[in-house]
Every structure is written in C-alpha cells, then in structure tokens.
Image: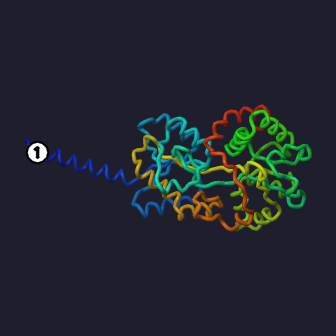
Amino acid sequence: MPVTKIAAGLTFTVAALLSASAAAQEVNVYNSRHYNTDRVIYEEFTKATGIKVNIIEGNHDELIQRMKSEGANSPADLFITVDAGRLAAAAKEGLLAPVTSPALAAVPATLRAPDGAWYGLSSRARVIVYARDRVKPEQVKDYEDLAKPEWKGKVLTRSGTHPYSLALTASMIEAQGEEKTEAWVKGLVANLARPPKGGDTDQIKAVAAGEGDLAIANTYYVGKLMVSEKPEDRAVAEKIGVIFPNQGNRGTHVNLSGAGVVKTAPHPEAARKLLEHLLSPEAQRVFADGNMEFPVNPAVKPHPKLVELGSFKQAEVNAASFAQYTPAALRIMDRAGWK
C-alpha cells in the first residue's frame, strides 16, 4: 500500500510538472489592435521561442473591464491597444506591472510610461489633410487654425467620442488649458462640413471628393491609400496633401499603439519576451511596412512613402501625462456638440 501511494503520488507530481511546463510555453494576449499584418509578428515569435501566442480579441474598454472582473484569476499576460489613454487608464487601475530591460529602454521616453507599466509599439501622427487644388499649405499651420472663421463649412472629422479625437483634445488641454481648448472645440464644430461620421479614410476621401477642404486624420491612413493596389485609392492620395501641425511651437500630436504586462499575468516571463519581440527591428519593420505606422524603435526607419510626407517635430508631452485629461476632453466635446 505505501508503495502504491508513493507511485501514485509520483505520477501526479510528474503530470503536474508536465502540465506546468506546457502552460509556460504560451502567452495570452488581450488585444484591441486588430490588424492582420500583426499575425506575422506572433508567428515569428513562436518560431523563435516555442511560446504559443493566444490572442483574445476585444474592444479596449471591454478588455480592461474584463481584466478588472477576473482579478487575480485573469488569464491575461499582455494587454495591447491602439490608444495610450487606455494604457494609462489600465495602469491607473493597477492592472499593469512595471517591467524594464535594455530592449525596452530603447523606446523614447515620451512613448512609454515613466515607470515601465506600458510601452508604445508604433505611432501615427495626427495630421491635417488638405485638398491640393483648394488649399495652400501655408494657410493652415496649427490645429488651432481649424477653428478660424474662414474655414466654416470646410472641416471634416470623425466622431468626437473616438479615442483618436479624445486624445488630441486631451493633449490640447495639457498644452493650453481647458478654457482655450473649449473655445477651439466650439470653433471646430462650427466649421464642420457635415456631422462627424466614418473613419479617418472616409474623411480623406471626402476631401478628395470636394465635400470639405480640410480633415483630421492619422498618417497611416494616408500611407495605406498611397500604397493601395486600388487605382482609385492612389488617385485619392494624389489629390490631398498633409500638414504636420504646430511645427512652430509644441509639435504634432501622435497616437500610439502600445502594450503592457498584466500585473496578475500567469506567464510574466513569456509576456516580457513577447513585449521585447514586438520592439525588435524585425517586428518594427512589420509595423512600418505592413501597416504604414511609425516605428518606435529608433533603429528602424519608416516606410519610404511616409518619409515622402516629410520629417516633423513631434509633441514631447508623454502620453501618460495628457491621458489624465481625457474625462475633461469628453465633457468639453460633448458641450460643444462634437458628437
């Protein structure tokens, strides 16, 4: 009997070890960054490390709420999203664990949390798109110019509740305070060519079609039109130009895709390895060429088509700083009618 118990116990222990070993060879990603090009990055990571990547897709706010509800039992190892404000919110909720390493330190200080709770993976400049045949670029230099009376009925933008719009407004509050920002939002809304609808690509196409003269959009949407296999998309890109706003002062606002290791991660080491891989030159090249984004790794150059748009001064405010103004931005935009 004692031998049987020992044998049974030994079998249980070995099985448990094997199970733990198998579990260590995977990493669970709560992901609100939905681009097919990213699959290549995960596949290469698995080939290099043997660690399987499990992707759990969802909306960023839904995933944050899910992690809060799951608590210590959450299977999430890495949280990835396309908005620095959501990363900052997750960190504020205590959901992310600060991590550091030489590979992670390569990310510029303005594109990561000061304590290492999250890191930018790629960036997109929030630019002003203009109609080449109707607007001279010297007429619009700053975001603030979009609120000038001469552009009444000529400005296009997506919904004010979208993270891109909220982040821009929050960054302006950080730069100039709530009073001036509210005046700007009211002026912008008064100049809209139509009620906000659609995504950034829709705004760009509307400018090319003559529905408006100016639009706010991320650079990667412009880049995708420039390299599209569809002649009609490339024709749109030829009709518009890009202005990098506020080059004479604080610089152009950028949106981030980013990631953070979850505080309760069952596989924290695998999560850190995946985060480092996402910042490797190989992965950054995929972000640059596959999705027309600006790499955050200084060793990797942007796609040549983005380089054609010109170099620009980027706002040096850390995303974690302006993200705190998101609630105020939402209130201001709601009062002004930027729906």
Rendered view: 152 above or below 104: above
Q: Position of residue 44 (x, y in %)?
A: 48, 63
x 44%, y 60%: residue: 46
x 57%, y 64%: residue: 299
**The N terminus lies in which quarter of the figure?**
top left
Would residue 333 be found to the left or right of residue 212 on screen?
left
Q: Which quadrant of the figure has residue 184?
A: top right
User: How does the figure colour the protein chain or chains?
Assistant: rainbow
Residue 201 in view: yes
Would residue 28 be found to the left or right of residue 176 on screen?
left
Would residue 257 be found to the left or right of residue 328 on screen?
left
Q: Position of residue 204 (x, y in %)?
A: 78, 55
Rendered view: 214 above or below 43: above
**The C terminus lies in which quarter of the figure?**
top right
Which secondary structure, mark 1? helix
x 54%, y 62%: residue: 283
Q: Which quadrant of the figure has residue 291?
A: bottom right
Crowding at label 1, few (<14), some or many (≥20) Cα neighbours within 10 Å? few
Residue 211 in view: no
The type of residue carrying mark 1 is Thr
Q: Which quadrant of the figure has residue 189?
A: top right
Give the number of callouts.
Answer: 1
Return the residue found at the far right. 150
Q: Which residue is mark 1?
A: 4
Rendered view: 105 above or below 175: below
Q: Position of residue 9 (x, y in %)?
A: 17, 44
Q: Position of residue 6 (x, y in %)?
A: 13, 45
